[in-house]
Image: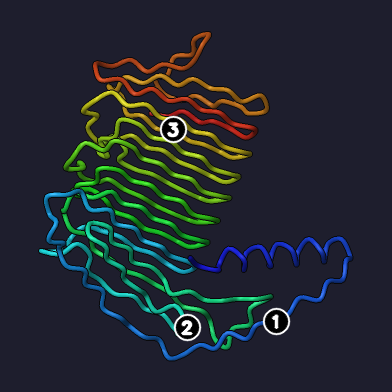
């Protein structure tokens, strides 16, 4: 896997030691950059098309953009990088496919000759898939509407991510798991994701979960967060209930939400959206 997590740890350690007046000699690693390389990404439709493909994207620092549109393929697009070791690699084993950033070994504080560049623009096909995204500190823009995602797992570090399901997911999604550090994450069109269970674990940061789209079946959502701001937006006409546990957190309600002794409720027909929020500190915002 990628060594970017060690880079973040070194930067944080440096800040703490400077603030405390502690002198620690940390080696400096010179990172040589090259003229930016644009590499074409083209992963064909697997022959095992009767199976659900397990697609994993391992990405470090940089910018990752995903959208539908890989005609007659699983993944198409480009990767642009200016550090040789960031050359993307593809591994295929039966129905398991991994696209990942090459390993960049960093020991100590990195010193870049030029500004680091690592950007993937990828299009995904409509093949039924379990999609896993593992990333470091990065910016992500994901449009996943109209795909056939059986399960979705995202794990990243300090990130800024916008994810949209602008169109309905073409299959029932079993689980949607999102685990992140201190981040800014906005998820839109979540009703269109068509999941039965969603679990989000997040650290300090700002998080928006917007459930527009068509809720075709009842769904359960669990959010566990640290000191953060969590905004939940459920459109009028959708039945929803929110149960909240947060000793040091405030709840801000606007719209048609009704507060009762054991939670917050939004009237509508079937199906029902059930959201459990566990927050150490911060604020929970409910909107229509």
Q: For this view, does 183 lie left or right of residue 28?
A: left
Q: Give the residue at mark 1.
A: 28
Q: Mark 1 falls on what kind of element?
A: strand
* Of residues 175 and 229, the one drawn nearer to the viewer in this rendering: 175
Which residue is found at the position 56% from the left and 76% from the top? 105
- In the rendered structure, which disc, 3 or 2, sits on the residue that comes first in sequence? 2
Disc 3 vs disc 2: Cβ atoms closer than 8 Å? no
16 up-or-down from 184: above or below: below
86 is higher (above) or lower (below) than 217: below
Q: Nearer the viewer, residue 50 or 57?
A: 50
Residue 54 at x, y percent in the picture: 28, 53
> Residue at horizontal 89%, vertical 65%?
21
Query: Which disc is residue 232 wearing?
Result: 3
Residue occupying image coordinates x 30% and y 30%: 196
Which label sits on residue 18? Answer: none
Q: Could you say which disc has been placed on residue 83 in the image?
A: 2
In the image, is 215 to the left or to the right of 137?
Answer: left
Q: Position of residue 1 (x, y in %)?
A: 48, 65
Q: Residues within 10 Å of mark 3 (few under 14, many from 20)?
A: some
């Amino acid at each position: 896997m990628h060594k970017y997590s060690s880079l973040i740890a070194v930067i944080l350690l440096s800040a703490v030691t400077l603030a405390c007046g502690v002198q620690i000699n940390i080696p400096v690693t010179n990172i040589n950059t090259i003229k930016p390389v644009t590499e074409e990404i083209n992963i064909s439709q697997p022959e095992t098309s009767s199976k659900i493909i397990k697609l994993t994207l391992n990405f470090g620092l940089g910018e990752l953009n995903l959208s539908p549109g890989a005609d007659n393929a699983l993944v198409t697009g480009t990767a642009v990088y200016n550090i040789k070791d960031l050359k993307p690699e593809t591994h295929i084993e039966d129905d398991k496919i991994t696209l990942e950033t090459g390993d960049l070994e960093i020991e100590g504080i990195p010193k870049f000759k030029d500004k680091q560049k690592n950007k993937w623009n990828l299009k995904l096909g409509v093949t039924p898939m379990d999609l896993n995204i593992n990333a470091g500190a990065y910016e992500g823009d994901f449009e996943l509407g109209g795909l056939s995602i059986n399960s979705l797992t995202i794990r990243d570090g300090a990130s800024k991510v916008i994810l949209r399901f602008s169109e309905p997911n073409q299959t029932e999604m079993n689980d949607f798991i999102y685990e992140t550090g201190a981040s800014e994450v906005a998820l839109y069109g979540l009703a269109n994701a068509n999941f039965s269970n969603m679990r989000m674990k997040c650290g300090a940061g700002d998080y928006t979960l917007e459930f527009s789209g068509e809720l075709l079946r009842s769904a359960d959502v669990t959010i566990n967060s640290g000191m953060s701001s969590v905004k939940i937006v459920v459109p009028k006409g959708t039945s929803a209930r929110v149960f909240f546990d947060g000793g040091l957190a405030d709840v801000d309600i606007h719209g048609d939400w009704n507060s009762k002794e054991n939670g917050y409720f939004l009237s509508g027909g079937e199906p029902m959206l059930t959201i459990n929020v566990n927050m150490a500190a911060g604020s929970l915002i409910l909107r229509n």
